[in-house]
């Protein structure tokens, strides 16, 4: 009697946690990976090295750490993602890591997304990462100009909605806060 003709995928593939074909290509490259994971509220970035017993995290950074550098805004946007990329890039250079490859996991590739904002932050910190320049977000978007423009428009049109939307943060001071935090991260 023969067995079944179908093949059941690995458990981590069924749970949509690991793409084994992509992981195998990363392992064949023999380079460290810049692992970027996003949630609804935060960004987590790690530089990971393959080890037969399990991957070893060399450097890590999270958007929750940005408050130490003076960031008072939300940690789930493009600006925070860029700053986390900058932070991990500086930490990687201190550990003498200068070349990595991007591992976005199972996240979809969307031009200008938070994942690529993190990539841009790492590039600006000095890491060497193979990429296409077309996918990176613009400088205006990283600095938060689009948020400021939206806030000004909303303030003119609907004051009540403006106060509700921006009750915690002040979008008018967003660009100067971004520059301050960026310089704090670059100093170390």
Image (spheres, rainbow, N blue to C red):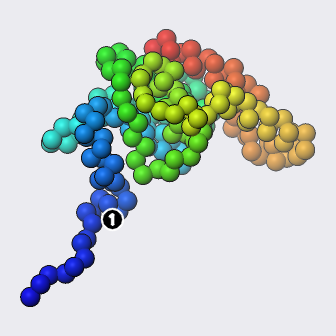
SS assignment at label 1: helix
Q: Which residue is rendered at x = 33% and y = 65% of the image?
A: 14
Q: Please determine whether, in this image, residue 22 is positioned above or below residue 31.
A: below
| 138 and 40: which is toward the camera | 138
Residue 93 is drawn in which quadrant?
top left
- Rendering coords of residue 122 (x, y %): 47, 26
- Rendering coords of residue 62 (x, y %): 45, 34
Point out the residue furthest to the top here: 187
Quadrant of the snapshot with the N terminus: bottom left
Q: Which residue is mark 1?
A: 14
Q: Please determine whether, in this image, residue 50 is positioned above or below residue 92.
A: below
Residue 79 is drawn in which quadrant?
top right
Q: Please determine whether, in this image, residue 83 is positioned above or below residue 13.
A: above
* Residue 21 seen in render: yes
Q: Which residue is rendered at x = 29% and y = 53% of the image?
A: 20
* Residue 68 seen in render: no
| 151 and 131: which is toward the camera | 131
Determine whether, in the image, residue 82 is placed left or right of residue 30. right
Point out the residue furthest to the left here: 1
- Rendering coords of residue 3 (x, y %): 14, 81
Determine whether, in the image, residue 8 is placed left or right of residue 154. left
Quadrant of the snapshot with the C terminus: top left
Q: How many marks?
A: 1
| 164 and 103: which is toward the camera | 103
Point out the residue furthest to the bottom here: 1
Q: Which residue is rendered at x = 30% and y = 31% of the image?
A: 32
- Rendering coords of residue 8 (x, y %): 25, 71
Determine whether, in the image, residue 6 is placed left or right of residue 118. left
Q: Which residue is rendered at x = 63% and y = 23% of the image?
A: 178
| Neighbourhood count class around disc 1 (C-alpha, 10 Å): few under 14, some 14–19, many 20 upward | few
């Amino acid at each position: 009697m023969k067995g079944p003709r179908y093949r059941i995928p690995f458990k981590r593939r069924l749970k949509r946690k690991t793409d084994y074909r992509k992981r195998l290509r990363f392992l064949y490259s023999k380079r460290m990976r810049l692992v970027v994971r996003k949630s609804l509220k935060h960004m987590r970035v790690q530089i990971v090295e393959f080890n037969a017993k399990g991957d070893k995290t060399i450097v890590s950074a999270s958007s929750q750490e940005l408050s130490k550098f003076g960031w008072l805004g939300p940690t789930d946007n493009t600006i925070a993602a860029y700053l986390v990329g900058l932070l991990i890039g500086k930490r990687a250079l201190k550990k003498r890591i200068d070349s990595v490859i991007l591992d976005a996991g199972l996240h979809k590739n969307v031009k200008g997304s938070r994942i690529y904002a993190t990539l841009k932050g790492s590039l600006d910190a000095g890491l060497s990462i193979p990429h296409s320049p077309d996918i990176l977000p613009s400088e205006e978007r990283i600095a938060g100009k689009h948020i400021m423009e939206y806030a000004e428009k909303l303030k003119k049109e609907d004051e009540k909605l403006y106060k509700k939307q921006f009750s915690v943060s002040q979008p008018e001071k967003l660009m100067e806060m971004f520059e301050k935090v960026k310089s704090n991260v670059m100093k170390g």
